[in-house]
Amino acid sequence: MKYFPLIWSGIWRKPGRTVLILLQVTVAFALFGVLQGMKMGVDHAVAETRADLLFVGPPDFGGAPLPLAYLDRIRSLPGMKDVSFADGFLGTYQKPSQAVFALAIPQADMWLTAMPSLFQILPKDLEALGKTRDGALITPDIGKKYGWHVGDRIPLTSNTLKTDGSGTWTFQIVGTVTDHEPGEAGLIAINYAYLDEARAFNKGTVRNFYAIISDPQRAAQMSDTIDRMFANSSHETKTASFRENAQQQMRSIGDLNFLIRSIISAVLVALLFSITTMMMQTMRERTAEFAVLKTLGFNGRAIFLLVVTEGLVVCVLAALMGLALATGVFPYAAKFIPGLSMPLAVIGLGLIGAVVVALITASLPASRAARLHVVDALAGR
Amino acid sequence: MMSFAKQFWALLRMNLAGIPARLGLVCTIVVGVTCAVGVLVSMLALGVGARREAMGNASPNRAILTSVDAPSPMQSSIGKDTVPQILNLPGIRRNAQGKPIVVFQVTVFVQARSKIDRGQLGFPLIGMTPGLTDYEPELHMTAGRLFNPGLHELIASNKCVRQYEDFGVGARRHLRGGDWTVVGNFDLASTVCLVFGDGETILSAFGRNTYNQANLMLQSPAAFAQVANTLEANPTLHLKVQHEAEIFEQNMRQINGILNFVSYFVGTIMALAATIGAANSLYAIVDSRRRELATLRAVGFNGAPIIASIVAESILLAVPGALVGAFVAWLLFNGLLASPLGASFHMAVTPSLVLLGLCWALGIGAIAALLPAVRAARVPVTVALRAT
């Protein structure tokens, strides 16, 4: 510890150079933190999604809706904790480019607790929705976008026709809902009972069911049971847990590991090369200083440690700043990938990386400084 | 002016002659630029490759009809009652039998099992009414035969065969309404797996009653305006027409947007790091040459040519770095099969990407050299000459 002032003054011998090295290492580790953090953070977010929450929908995307009568048949299966459902339609507000998705839900407790990271309704809002047949809950985002407030009446135009043949749906805003699901269309929540009564076609059907099972381990088995129950009927189903769906979504992003590894390697190569040459240059300029230290009684080992510690302090300090910067990016990224956060493992990995970078880059100049011949160095040879 | 050029050349030759003596610092600049440009070019090669394969097949002779208010063909619906009116549109090319080349298309998404990890992924199953080969003469069968109307038969592109299980000729797939047989494989430019079947059969199997889009083969690219005018004159048809390329572009916009954002984000950070590293090396070079520079100033060299010569040196070092970086990117990634975001395509390192990399290198070299060059020009003659 008593050598710290010596190390500190060594680091700041050329402030301009040190600041640039610090910046370069910071930038490199910020990039590392973002890339590696995204990769591991996404894996983590997928592992955190609920395995006991099953999504029961039609087997093909945009396929014919399912009969509401399935609700009781799914609920009666052993091992089933709670079942609910949702429907909805896509409408536009004022202009064809302003899409709004109306999610139609029944009065069910599941909406309060099932998917807090995706979609959340407070008990008072659900109650308010239940009291107003043509009520709607809006997300704060969409409220801000179109200037909607509680109490307003909003008209939506849709291809989903009402019994009177018109495609204009008017809702009264009664509360708010939080929605974290990424999507271009804004979202409002409406009463399923109202939608089903007012629409002209597809009465008595739903888009999909949500089923909570008591044992998450049996998710795959329960999914099969549900699909088998409706196999060869006019409305077959496709069931999967939220976790399986998230895994599938991640798979569709594809295997970019090779690319990420290549980028991180390129960053490391550039960094190692740059820092090593800079430290060698610094050593050359400080030859006389080290010779003086040796004259004062510092042995080779002490000088080696001195130089390596300088490198360590710079690299670890800069890596910490870089990783902090990267962590600051994650709240923004979480808007697109719900549940995403910077994994601590990446910070640890980054710090280990910083130590390795410091050891590699500092050892060559340090061993040179340690092997100095005092007489030659002082003579400037 | 004459003396500026003369001084500049003399200084630049002196700078370049000194490179062997400062190999380490010089290499730092080259390696930094190599890595930054290499990463930028490889990342952009994703977007370029995706675009090239998506647009490869687009023809100005093909036009696509969808309903007026549909943001994309997936949300569009064309009822069977409008079919005769669409067949009567002007400017449509006729086939050997004298029938207009119009193919109605319905797209449904169904699940397939990935070959790589056996996970489920969605693929588009496209139902086409008769005339597919007239409309897509580029479709090249590599195995088997075309599907027959009215039967549960499919043909799958070779991309599907590579990506998913059970798409080879003879494979049976269980879809809505029973077993379907894959009777042929084909090649057609696209970034995604394509599976075609008979339009009517798919409509009835999936319980649909409207098509998504109508595909027209025009007599000439100029006939597009004719179709557009006719549709405009008949608003009751509720249809709009778009060039095939426009639809492809629309489909590409999202994936291209994401790929380009990520590429430029990572590329900018790498360039920043390279610039900082190069600036640091140039500072060190200038510092080590203080006496030399002061001497030059003392014998009458001006500041401007000194600045210019150092900036030029930096750029000359960055250019080979960029070329090496682009070459490594080409070596590692050109033609590599990438499958991000559900698409599948070959990455492409093109001359224009190499040029872009060179421009970035010029920028890195020039920006990095600016401050060190100014310091070099400002070396105080007396102080520097006295320095040891």
Image (cartoon, coloured by chain):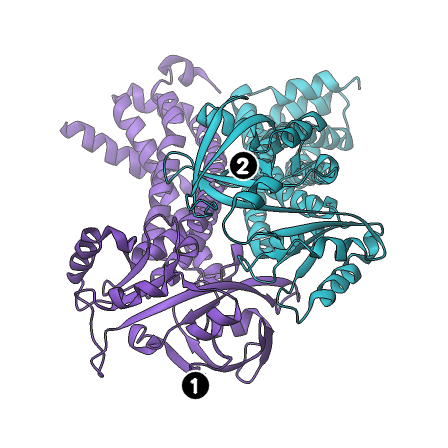
* Whole-number angstrom distance, CA of label 1 to CA of label 2: 46 Å
Q: Quadrant of the N terminus of chain B?
A: top left
* Mark number, residue B61: none
Asked which secondary structure carries label 2, the reply is strand
* Mark number, residue A187: 2
Task: Depth check: give the residue in front, B81 or A359.
Answer: B81
Q: Which chain is cyan?
A: A
Q: Is residue B270 left or right of residue B221?
A: right
Q: Is residue A45 left or right of residue A148?
A: right
Q: Position of residue B183 (x, y in %)?
A: 49, 83
Query: How many discs mark residues in the rendered view?
Result: 2
Name the kind of residue labelled 2 in the image.
Leu
Q: Residue furthest front?
A: A164
* Mark number, residue B145: 1
| Mark 1 surroundings within 10 Å by alpha-carbon count, few (fewer than 14), some (14 through 19), many (20 or more) | some
Q: Position of residue B375 (x, y in %)?
A: 39, 21
Report the chain holding disc 2.
Answer: A
- Residue at horizontal 28 percent and vertical 21 percent from the top: B303
